Image (cartoon, rainbow, N blue to C red):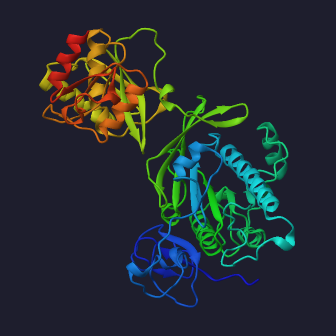
């Protein structure tokens, strides 16, 4: 097989050079030339031509109303938490990119998911064969579906490993209790051989672990380089779209936590998942950052056990304290992760500081903490100028929504005064610079989750207050406030 010609494209101006140069001859930028496969049929200086050509099939121009749009058929993975993040299951021809720290559990979760899917495929195929009767009595196929597009009949799974041997994968499956697993394994890192295997096996879903280990013979750069990762991901994406195979790419992450490789990798795929969690903790979070087939910002919660990762049906229990009695500096809030309301404990510690007091937050925005302290001083008369302030979201969860403002401020005030908040107390709401308490989205769902878990007192924005005589909030006393001063007055009356 003849090797395709390569060229080098400038990431700044899009200029093309036949060989690598330290400085771009077109715009004089340094270290911007990236290797790529040359397009001999249509030479161009567009810097995106080599990256995106062929990702979508060419077709005639069609009016939007004339296109027959149907819901994508989904295949469950056998793990409810993973299905939640994916939007209900895998989609035919979809490409999923999952990244996370080393040892966080990416390969473990995917191996468990493949085994669950393969067992479900085998059961469905056996049931279909039993219900169809003898071969001569079976109806003739109507055609139109590829052999791998199985629906409820059957299918196959493929695990392509570039970091481990087949024996290591087998040992891991035995440690996870996956006895007699029928998942097919391929230990290969050459792209052309992987594509040939996908064409021959035509699995329903294939996992590539990891994309940084795959290389193409058409490029001279080393595996894991920007050119190799981009070109291999582009070929695999084209293969998924043309054949209907769902491909899951495992990606390495940098020390900052972002996916390693070119940013275009996240644009090419359909779904981007991040595996989060502390390796010293048994709990893991899978967060959807991008999803063309479902909602973004969904999370799945897993617990690492001796038999692998298990889904957590009630994640609020993880993020709530186990105190027998209320303690100063602790306040519970209801945060939204996609469509799921979760109760999270916010802890604050205020201690006497030196001439340069510290402001430290874990799981919350540090700059927003400084702003809330200024609002607390200006509009509520609570001064922390000479105090060290530490704020933490329990359980390693990261809260990015401003609805945590009110809970953070009440926790800080409770720690400063040394007086705990009432038992069964929670609060949520955004606080503005003028001291007003703004409503949080989907406040009714937050309150229903709190009432279901037995909370008795809540301080919420006035716009989130439910209607009177609503039986969904029985047992929950709700105090609606408009300003931060009112919230502190309510707390003083309850203490």
Residue 43 visible to the viewer: yes
x, y percentage for residue 291? Answer: 48, 57
Q: Nearer the viewer, residue 54 or 47?
A: 54
Quarter of the image with the C terminus is top left
Q: Nearer the viewer, residue 64 or 267?
A: 64
**Residue 94 shown left or right of residue 30 in the figure:** right
Q: Nearer the viewer, residue 120 or 39?
A: 120
**Residue 323 shown left or right of residue 73 in the figure:** left
Instruction: Identify the residue at horizontal 57%, vertical 75% (top origin).
Output: 36
Quadrant of the rendered structure where residue 388 is? Answer: top left
Q: 224 above or below 484? A: below
Q: 329 above or below 3? A: above
Residue 254 visible to the viewer: no
Instruction: Identify the residue at horizontal 74%, vertical 49% (top origin).
Output: 115
Residue farthest to the bottom, as pictured: 41
Q: 271 above or below 413? A: below
Quarter of the image with the N terminus is bottom right
x, y percentage for residue 454? Answer: 41, 21
x, y percentage for residue 343? Answer: 41, 29
Q: 41 above or below 195? A: below
Quadrant of the rendered structure where residue 327 is? Answer: top left
Q: Nearer the viewer, residue 189 or 243?
A: 243
Quadrant of the rendered structure where residue 467 is? Answer: top left
**Residue 370 shown left or right of residue 229 in the figure:** left
Instruction: Identify the residue at horizontal 50%, vertical 76% (top origin).
Output: 9
x, y percentage for residue 455? Answer: 37, 21
């Amino acid at each position: 097989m003849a090797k395709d010609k390569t060229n080098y494209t400038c990431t700044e101006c899009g200029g093309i050079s036949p060989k690598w140069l330290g400085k771009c001859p077109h715009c004089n930028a340094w270290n911007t030339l990236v290797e790529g496969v040359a397009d001999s049929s249509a030479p161009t200086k567009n810097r995106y031509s080599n990256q995106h050509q062929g990702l979508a099939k060419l077709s005639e121009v069609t009016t939007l109303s004339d296109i027959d749009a149907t819901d994508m058929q989904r295949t469950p993975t056998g793990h409810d938490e993973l299905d939640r993040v994916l939007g209900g299951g895998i989609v035919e021809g979809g490409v999923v990119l999952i990244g996370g720290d080393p040892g966080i559990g990416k390969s473990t979760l995917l191996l468990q998911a493949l085994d669950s899917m393969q067992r479900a495929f085998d059961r469905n195929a056996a049931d279909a064969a039993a219900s169809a009767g003898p071969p001569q009595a079976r109806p003739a196929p109507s055609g139109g579906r590829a052999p791998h597009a199985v629906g409820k009949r059957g299918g196959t799974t493929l695990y392509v490993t570039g970091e481990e041997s087949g024996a290591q994968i087998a040992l891991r499956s035995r440690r996870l209790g996956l006895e007699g697993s029928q998942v097919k394994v391929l230990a290969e890192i050459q792209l052309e051989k992987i594509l040939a295997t996908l064409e021959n096996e035509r699995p329903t879903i294939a996992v590539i672990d990891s994309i940084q280990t795959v290389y193409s013979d058409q490029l001279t750069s080393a595996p894991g380089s920007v050119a190799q990762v981009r070109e291999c991901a582009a070929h695999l994406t084209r293969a998924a779209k043309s054949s209907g195979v769902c491909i899951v790419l495992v990606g390495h992450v940098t020390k900052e936590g972002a996916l390693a490789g070119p940013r275009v990798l996240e644009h090419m795929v359909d779904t981007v998942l991040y595996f989060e969690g502390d390796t010293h903790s048994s709990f893991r979070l899978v967060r959807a950052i991008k999803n063309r087939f479902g909602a973004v910002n969904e999370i799945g919660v897993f617990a690492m056990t001796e038999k692998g990762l298990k889904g957590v049906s009630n994640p609020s229990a993880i993020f709530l304290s186990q105190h027998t009695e209320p303690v100063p500096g602790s306040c519970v809030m209801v945060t939204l992760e996609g469509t799921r309301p979760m109760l999270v404990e916010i802890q604050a510690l205020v201690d006497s500081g030196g001439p340069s007091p510290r402001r430290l937050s874990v799981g919350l925005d540090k700059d927003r903490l400084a702003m809330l302290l200024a609002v607390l001083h200006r509009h509520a008369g609570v001064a922390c100028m000479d105090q060290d302030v530490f704020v933490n979201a329990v359980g390693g969860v990261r809260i990015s929504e401003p609805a945590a403002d009110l809970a953070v401020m009440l926790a800080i005030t409770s720690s400063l005064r040394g007086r705990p908040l009432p038992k069964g107390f929670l609060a949520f709401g955004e606080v503005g610079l003028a001291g007003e308490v703004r409503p949080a989205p989907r406040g009714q769902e937050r309150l229903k989750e709190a009432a279901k878990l037995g909370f008795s007192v809540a301080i919420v924005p006035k716009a989130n207050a439910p209607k009177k005589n609503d039986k969904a909030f029985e047992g929950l006393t709700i105090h609606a406030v408009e300003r931060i001063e009112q919230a502190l007055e309510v707390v003083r009356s309850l203490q």
